[in-house]
Amino acid sequence: MVITLDDIANELKQYRATKSTWKVLAQLVEKCTCLEGKHDRGKTMSLVAISYWLREWFGRPVITVESSMGLKPSFGPHKHLSIKAFVDELKKLTEVAKIGQNGHQPEELGDAINEALKRLGVNLMYATLVFDEANKLFEARRPQDPLVLLVGYFVQQMAHYHNTVLIATPNRRAIDYRVREQVDFWGRPRYDELTNTCQVDFFKLMPERLMSLRIQGERYFDMYDRWSLVAFRGKALNIKEAYL
């Protein structure tokens, strides 16, 4: 086998790209990241790629909530939770949280919590939670909606459960203010149809770009169905006859 200078250059280029991607993703671990942009900007593809590599490189299980993003078997191990199942998981975490109030000695507390996590089958701990089309769960116009309150409170408490939260929305103003205040990074995807690549620029509150992530779309197209449908909330469909 003959190794040319071009081969070495390509390997070096690939190594640098991988190292750069790892550095960006490492900053997203156990943080809340919100991707915003219009339709066809590459939000869902970016969520797929980011959650995939958080699992592969950082061992973070992937859980999609409400919208499954149309993930296929080629994506690899993941779990999907309906809204009801997600609420049930939060109830389990509440039971685990009560253990610290039951008089356990400090040296016994860790074992008691681990035993409860196994007994209850809690799936959320240390997971990457993906909320695609998040307006449904974080709707800014319904701040007193019980579901909006509950999910917003969870995002406020996510650090206690070592979660990484990924959110996608057309516009940050559509997200409840309690969740917006917890966002660590705002991402703006830009998909290029000519090259099938998507660049995600990450920001905090200031307008200066902090870091960027370049995603090769062809690698992820077979991992999800971009045309998968998202159901409407039943409450939103409950419209009185007089308004029709």
Image (cartoon, rainbow, N blue to C red):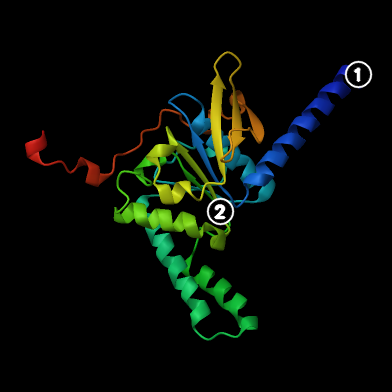
Mark number displayed over residue 210: none
Q: Earlier in the sequence, mark 1 or mark 2?
A: 1
The residue carrying mark 2 is: 127
Kindly identify the residue that appears in the image at 63 percent across and 32 percent down. Answer: 209
Image vertical order of residue 79 relative to residue 170, above or below? below
Give the image location of residue 155, x and y in percent: 47, 54
Q: Amino acid at mark 2?
A: Ala
Q: Is residue 173 left or right of residue 238?
A: right
- The reply to whether residue 84 is in sight is no
- Image point (50%, 78%), residue name: 99
Residue 22 lies, in percent from the top left, at: 71, 40
The image position of residue 230, as x and y in percent, is 35, 36
Residue sitting nearer the eye, 169 or 233: 169
List x then y, in percent, for residue 59. 65, 51
Secondary structure type for disc 1? helix
Answer whether labels 1 and 2 touch (C-beta < 8 Å): no
Amino acid type, mark 1: Leu
Question: Which of the pair 62/185 is nearer the observer?
Answer: 185
Residue at left offset 59%, top offset 79%: 109
In the image, 20: left or right of 88?
A: right
Q: Which residue is mark 1?
A: 5
- Please indicate, yes or no, whether residue 181 appears anywhere in the rendered image: yes
User: Seen in the image, is 58 located left or right of residue 161?
Assistant: right
Q: Residues within 10 Å of mark 1 (few under 14, many from 20)?
A: few
